């Protein structure tokens, strides 16, 4: 266990050195090229002759992870793996949209004069893209479930503790916004395993009793805004209607 901690500490030191030193960043990418390729293959998960585009995207995602990673918010390699997966999903989404824009309204060879490619499509779905999105979502949910378990929570606890009234939901949204603007709050949550209710109350004017009643819910949404969990964060826009999370 001590060896694992030391290894993670060394990785974090290398990451922080690579943030401002491109040579150090190149060395770090080369050192973890096997990891990058492995995560790429796990994300792609389909037979193919070559992964030139995907590998370039995965390496760039790893470099982005170096620049965006913040110490104290989880293991770097887990964060980098999520970044690689997210970038590849975006790539496939854009590829599918591009193919549709180019081809759907063009006449289809061998068909009648008025026929177009979109007339030949069964339901307009890309089964592989659906699969990629579903796999990515399931994996992120499993990782988030593990993180919740570290705090003694499960999804049913969070669902049961979700605010029912609009006023309370808005109060929780203020707490989240304040925590996002003050990353030390998220760091403190991860380090101590406890919600810093006093500091949140002072910073947002939210009633302490309200936060105590919905502590499990607040812990969950704040955890979602630590490193990673992009898909889960995308669903939190429901907290503040009309605005993206």
Image: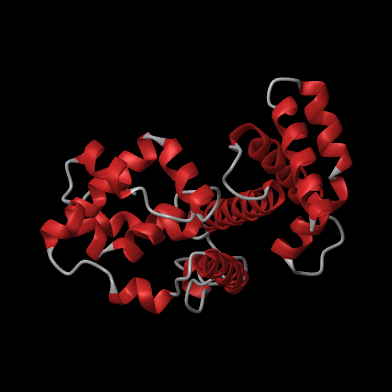
Numbered circles on residues, count: 0
Please name the residue shown 59% across and 35% down the image. Answer: 68
Please name the residue shown 71% across and 44% down the image. Answer: 57
Apparent side of residue 41 relative to residue 105 in the rendered image (left or right): right
Looking at the image, can residue 91 be seen? yes
Please name the residue shown 87% across and 38% down the image. Answer: 30
Q: How is the image coloured?
A: secondary structure
Residue 95 x %, y %: 60, 53
Residue 212: quadrant of the picture: bottom left
- Closer-to-camera residue (183/45): 183
Residue 48 x %, y %: 82, 64
Apparent side of residue 7 relative to residue 105 in the rendered image (left or right): right
Residue 241 x %, y %: 21, 54
Looking at the image, can residue 51 be seen? no
- Say if 200 sits above or below 106 in the image: above
- Say if 162 sits above or below 1 in the image: below
The quadrant of the rendering that contains the N terminus is: bottom right
Apparent side of residue 212 relative to residue 154 in the rendered image (left or right): left
Residue 2 x %, y %: 80, 53
- Closer-to-camera residue (59/119): 59
Please name the residue shown 78% across and 33% down the image. Answer: 14
């Amino acid at each position: 266990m001590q060896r694992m901690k030391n290894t993670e500490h060394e990785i974090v030191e290398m990451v922080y050195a690579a943030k401002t030193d491109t040579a150090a960043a190149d060395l770090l990418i080369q050192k973890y090229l096997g990891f990058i390729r492995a995560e790429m293959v796990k994300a792609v998960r389909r037979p193919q002759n070559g992964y030139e585009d995907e590998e370039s995207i995965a390496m760039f995602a790893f470099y982005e992870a170096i620049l965006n990673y913040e110490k104290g918010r989880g293991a770097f390699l887990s964060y980098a793996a999520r970044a690689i997966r997210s970038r590849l999903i975006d790539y496939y989404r854009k590829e599918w949209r591009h193919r549709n824009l180019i081809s759907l309204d063009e006449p289809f060879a061998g068909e009648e004069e008025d026929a177009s490619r979109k007339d030949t499509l069964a339901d307009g779905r890309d089964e592989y893209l659906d699969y990629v999105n579903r796999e990515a979502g399931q994996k992120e949910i499993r990782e988030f479930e593990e993180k919740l378990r570290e705090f003694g929570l499960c999804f049913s606890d969070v669902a049961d503790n979700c605010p029912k009234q609009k006023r309370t939901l808005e109060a929780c949204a203020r707490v989240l916004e304040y925590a996002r603007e003050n990353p030390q709050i998220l760091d403190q949550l991860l380090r101590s395993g406890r919600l810093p209710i006093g500091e949140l109350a002072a910073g947002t004017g939210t009633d302490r009793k309200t936060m105590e009643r919905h502590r499990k819910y607040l812990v969950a949404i704040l955890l979602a805004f630590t490193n990673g969990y992009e898909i889960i964060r995308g669903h939190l826009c429901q907290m503040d209607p009309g605005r993206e999370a």
